[in-house]
Image (cartoon, grey):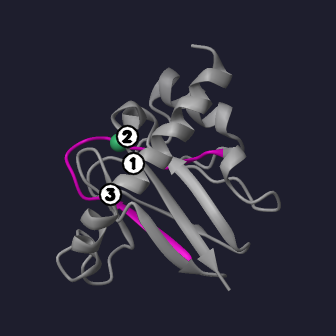
Amino acid sequence: MNRRVYLAAVGTAASASLAGCSSVLSVFDDDDGPCAGDECDIGMSRNEFLPESYEASVGETVVWKNTSGADHTVTALENQIPDEAEYFASGGYEDEETAIDAWHESRGGRLGTRDTYEHTFDVPGTYAYICEPHVKGGMIGEVVVVD
Ligand SMILES: [Cu+2]
């Protein structure tokens, strides 16, 4: 698939998905979410990040946990994070293309059941990220980092 078309499609899906789910998100703001307690901040169900939008403070380490039986990734979209921010992806890849290629070649960056991934956010702004194996089903999230 043409890379530019692919990224445009992801962007559209992200906006539609995040805009359409605001009423659903509030369900997971209470203690019923998959990360109730202190184990993680963002859970991964079979095909969703919960919550889809997570607010963090500058300097905060955000922990994702695969709370499902499916394999997932956390893969930042490098053109949808702040310019000065460090790229992040499960597997520790330094750019999006490498991360996505690694998944398709060898399931690189895979987070299996109960695996966790963490990243510390030092630059304020909005960070969009995807689960590469489920992005077509809308498995997209964002972290909003505030001062
Ligand atoms: Cu996934």
- 146 over 62 or under it: above or below: below
Q: Are marks 3 and 1 in contact (CB under 8 Å)?
A: yes
Q: Secondary structure at mark 2?
A: loop
Residue 126 rendering spot, x and y as whole percentages: 63, 64
Find residue 63 and report its image quarter.
bottom left
- Rounded to the nearest angstrom, the CA distance separating label 2 from label 3 is 11 Å
Label 1 sits on residue: 17
- State which tag comes first along the sequence, 2 or 3: 3
Check disc 1 and give the amino acid type: Ser
Magenta extent = 61-77
Task: Indicate if the residue with disc 3 has its beta carbon within 8 Å of ligand 1.
Answer: no
* Residue 64, magenta (yes or no): yes
Mark 2 or 3, closer to the camera: 3
Q: Are marks 1 and 2 in contact (CB under 8 Å)?
A: yes
Q: Is residue 88 left or right of residue 46?
A: right
Mark on residue 71? none
Label 3 sits on residue: 21
Label 2 sits on residue: 138
Q: Secondary structure at mark 1?
A: helix
Residue 136 rendering spot, x and y as whole percentages: 39, 30
- 85 over 107 or under it: above or below: below
